[in-house]
Image: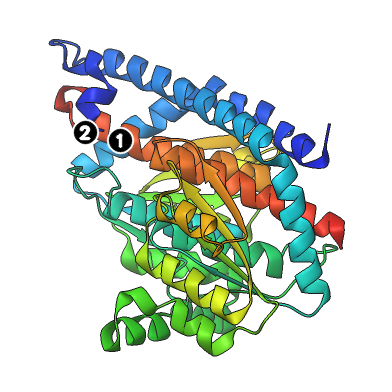
Amino acid sequence: MSVEELYPFLYAGGGNAVADVLAEVRRSTADKAAEIVALRQRIAADYADRLDACAAALAGSFRAGGRMFTFGNGGSSSDAQAVAQLFLDPGSGIRALPAIALTTDVAVVTALSNDVGFEVVFARQLAAFARPGDVAVGLSTSGGSANVLAAFAEARRLGLVTVGFAGYDGGRMAEAAAAGAIDHLFVVPSASVHRIQEAQTTTYHVLWELTQSCL
Amino acid sequence: MTAAAELFDRRVAPGQALGADAELVALACHDMARRFAGGGKLVVFGSGAAATDAQHLAVEFVHPVIVGKRAFPALSLAADVATLTGVASRDGVAEVFARQLRLLADPADIALGLSVDGNCPLVRGGLDAARERGLLTVALVGGDGGAVAAGPLADHVLVARSTDPRVVKEVHVTTYHVLWELVHVFFEHPGAL
């Protein structure tokens, strides 16, 4: 969506004074805050039970010696890193769990991309590291990232517990879940990449806290 | 109420509080837009989970998700592990952002530090070095704002109203998404810069 569509007031003629723009920007900030609050409440209603089930599965995997692998692209790569960091280094007095982000080793990521192709950057790492019973966590706002889908296919082949975070209508990740390649899929029903990422952040934080409660 | 529902419920008040702070967000956006208009770049830093936010924020500006939006220069100081560990082992961990900032930032730039409690010594060091060089300084903090909110470290201090570091991070994600979007709004109205 263009800025013109988002802020028609600003493009209606005149309205260029600092005060006018500041007022519009203020209102927009308040609107977006209200939007994400409502979206989180909708996810709570839609997914509370499924988050409980997913947390129980993750706790079962960790109890059996499983490790978590996380992956995503762009902003979702920083989320993948945040998920791994949260499980691995949650702060003093909180149980730390083994988790590795597959996005952080630039030598591996560029080697696989250059030599084979960007679609395999996560799948090949799973093939190298993962064992049956480990956990794969993939994030994609569109649900359509080819390397994330390839990683889920590899994770399924290896016998991992698979957890997906997507947005919009879930895209190809929803198809993968329907076909049995993703065990636990959480789709944020929004058309805004930003609100999707914000709601995904809350969802994986809640999942982490529920997992901690199960252990 | 289930445990999951209670956890989501914990997010409502801090989420609404960001809306109440809209004036502060708007003023920070305005100053950031003016720095970009003057040729400045955005330099971002945070430690732990906030390091991932620094990366996220930088990619947000450099490679906008909305097709056709201009790219703004933004650099995360949390990405270069060789430099981070090199500075930390030689000069101490509190120096890791300050050292990079003194070498890589210009006075026209914007420094943005994220710390969930406002007390991260690495972020405080970065903001301190940024002020000395004359950068615009913006801090995203939480809890009671800690040392960052108490001191003169930042021109704009945006406090996420929660003491739960996870909830603070969530409010920060919304805050920097809004900062990104609204900087563009100012920028596209040169009369408002």
Q: Quadrant of residue A129?
A: bottom right
Image x and y of residue A66, in percent: 73, 78
Q: Quadrant of residue B29?
A: top left
* Marks 1 and 2, how far apart at CA: 6 Å
Camera-side residue of A153 and A25:
A153
Q: Chain of mark 1?
A: B
- Kindly state the secondary structure of the residue where label 2 is placed: helix
Residue situated furthest front in the rendering: A179
Residue drawn at (19%, 40%) of the image: B37
- Identify the mark at residue B127; answer none if there is no mark: none
Q: Which residue is mark 1?
A: B183
Q: Which residue is mark 2?
A: B187
Image x and y of residue A154, in percent: 50, 77
Quarter of the image containing the N terminus of chain B? Answer: top right
Camera-side residue of A7 and B46:
A7
Does the CB distance between marks 1 and 2 fall below 8 Å?
Answer: yes
